[in-house]
């Protein structure tokens, strides 16, 4: 069985979330934090031997205190994030075990995951070396200038919207971050592409939303109830009962 590690990226600014109490990965959703919903799907997998969460330096002490019980029970490792997405993942890579063959990178603020989706993405990564979920663009696309005027209509042919988790051979992902061709890349697939490795696309789901605004929490709460149920022989990882005491 291939061995996987998963990095949960949770070091962003959450500037559009506009909550004075929480950044979006740490906000309560259905009685536990958003990031815990994301983490539990990976913790329940037998092929995942390490889960890390990368948190901004400014949140590190608070996070470790707030979620101390969860981190201890679940065995999730906390690492210091960086100023950009690429810097955050690069920092987490330094803590990935040498025994790991594949590394998944997931937005901690994407809590609506189904076991069957992960099975498909992980299998595709093993087969092809790198795999990401994405969904075809269905809407008409417009390029707009700074004044708000449409400049052109962009063809949506063969355009896909990338999601996470994105899963890569460990050596490919480490190589991509070591070379740092585009340190401003907004996803890891762009870095891996830039060093010449192919990326296989698995069709994702519109249910796999990334929480950006507080309104998205309401939508995510409804979507959690719509997700395909896990297999009976693979129960979700148990959580402490006092998450929000």
Image (tube, rainbow, N blue to C red):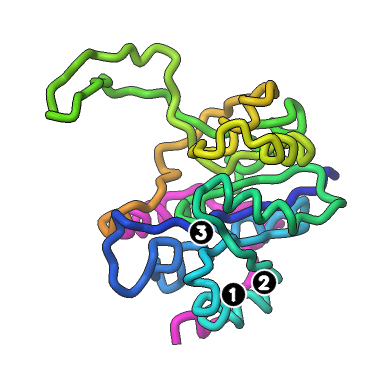
Q: Main secondary structure of the magenta part?
A: loop
Which quadrant of the figure contains the C terminus?
bottom left
Position of 240 relative to 49 (above/below)? below
| Residue denoted by label 3 | 10
Report how far apart the C-alphas of labels 3 and 1 lie in the structure: 20 Å
Q: How many marks?
A: 3
| Label 1 crowd (10 A; few <14 / some 14-19 / many >=20) | some
The x, y position of residue 44, in whole percent, is 67, 59
Identified at 33% across, 74% down, the residue is 21
SS of the residue at dot 2?
A: helix
> Regarding mark 3 in the picture, which secondary structure is present there?
strand
Image position of 238 with respect to 220: above or below: below
Q: Are marks 2 and 3 in contact (CB under 8 Å)?
A: no
Is 134 positioned to the left or the right of 173 in the image? left
Location of residue 31 (image quadrant): bottom left
- Closest to the observer: 65 or 118? 65
Above or below, comparing residue 117 to residue 13 in the picture: above
Residue occupying the point 57% across, 45% down: 86
Point out residue 34 in the picture as x, y percentages from the top left corner: 45, 63
- Determine whether label 1 and label 2 are within 8 Å by CB: yes
Q: Does 127 sit left or right of 195 as displayed?
A: right
Dot placed on the residue nearer the N-terminal end, 2 or 3: 3
Tag nearer the camera, 3 or 1:
3
* Dot label at residue 74: 2
**Residue at mark 1:** 239
What residue range appears in magenta?
A: 217-245
């Amino acid at each position: 069985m291939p061995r996987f590690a998963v990095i949960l990226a949770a070091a962003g600014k959450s500037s559009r979330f506009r909550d004075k109490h929480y950044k979006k990965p740490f906000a309560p959703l259905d009685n536990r934090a958003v990031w815990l919903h994301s983490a539990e799907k990976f913790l329940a997998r037998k092929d995942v031997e390490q889960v890390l969460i990368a948190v901004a330096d400014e949140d590190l002490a608070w996070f470790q205190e707030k979620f101390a019980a969860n981190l201890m029970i679940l065995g999730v490792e906390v690492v210091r994030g960086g100023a950009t997405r690429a810097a955050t993942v690069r920092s987490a890579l330094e803590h990935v075990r040498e025994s790991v063959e594949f590394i998944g990178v997931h937005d901690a603020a994407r809590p609506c995951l189904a076991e069957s989706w992960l099975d498909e993405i992980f299998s595709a990564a093993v087969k092809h070396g790198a795999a990401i979920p994405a969904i075809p663009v269905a809407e008409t696309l417009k390029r707009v200038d700074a004044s708000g005027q449409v400049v052109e209509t962009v063809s949506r042919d063969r355009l896909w919207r990338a999601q996470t988790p994105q899963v890569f051979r460990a050596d490919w992902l480490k190589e991509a971050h070591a070379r740092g061709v585009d340190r401003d890349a907004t996803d890891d697939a762009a870095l891996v592409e830039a060093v010449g490795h192919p990326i296989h696309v698995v069709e994702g789901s519109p249910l796999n939303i990334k929480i950006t605004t507080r309104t998205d929490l309401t939508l995510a709460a409804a979507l959690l109830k719509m997700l395909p149920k896990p297999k009976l022989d693979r129960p979700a990882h148990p959580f402490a009962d006092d998450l929000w005491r």
